[in-house]
Image (tube, rainbow, N blue to C red):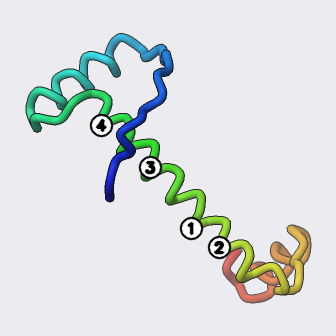
Amino acid sequence: MTIETKSKRTTIYLEPDLHKALRLKSATISKSVTQLINEAVRESLAEDADDITSFEKRANEPLLSYDEMVKRLRKSGKI
């Protein structure tokens, strides 16, 4: 994956312990804090994209209410 040469600057506020852990990890694995944050955001967005794809695939499935699900669980002896 290539990183664009033009980056956007932003300000984020981290909890002190998170910031310390991020700086320590950065030093330990020889990656900048910026690289670590970009990777974390990419992973989070990729997970969202996967979730959206999964929801889209299941869009035509019949809906099952909570009440019906509880009844099925009781009938099958699972609750």
Q: Nearer the viewer, residue 39 or 75?
A: 39
Mark 2 vs mark 4: which is more N-terminal? 4
Residue designated by label 3: 42
Q: Spatial distance from mark 4 to mark 3, Cα to Cα? A: 10 Å
Q: Residue furthest top?
A: 16
Q: Quadrant of residue 1?
A: bottom left
Nearest the viewer among 69 and 21 is 21
Amino acid bearing label 4: Leu
Q: Residues within 10 Å of mark 3 (few under 14, many from 20)?
A: few
C-alpha span from label 4 to label 1: 21 Å
The residue at which mark 4 appears reads as 36
Q: Which quadrant does the C terminus fall into?
A: bottom right
Q: Residue 71 occupies which quadrant of the picture? A: bottom right
Q: Is residue 22 above or below residue 48?
A: above
Horizontal arrangement in the rendering, residue 50 relative to residue 13 (left or right) = right
Residue at image mark 2: 53
Which mark is in front, 3 or 1?
Answer: 3
As drawn, 69 above or below 32: below
Q: Spatial distance from mark 3 to mark 1, Cα to Cα?
A: 12 Å
Q: Could you say whether the residue bearing mark 3 is in a helix, strand or loop?
A: helix
Q: Is residue 54 above or below residue 41?
A: below
For mark 1, does the 10 Å Cα neighbourhood hold few (<14), some (14 to 19), or many (20 or more) residues?
Answer: few
Does label 3 or label 2 sit earlier along the sequence?
Answer: 3
Find disc 1 in the rendering and name its residue: 50
Mark 3 or mark 2, whichever is nearer to me: 3
Q: How many marks?
A: 4
Give how far apart the Cα atoms at labels 2 and 1 are: 5 Å
Q: Earlier in the sequence, mark 4 or mark 1?
A: 4
Marks 3 and 4: in contact by CB < 8 Å?
no
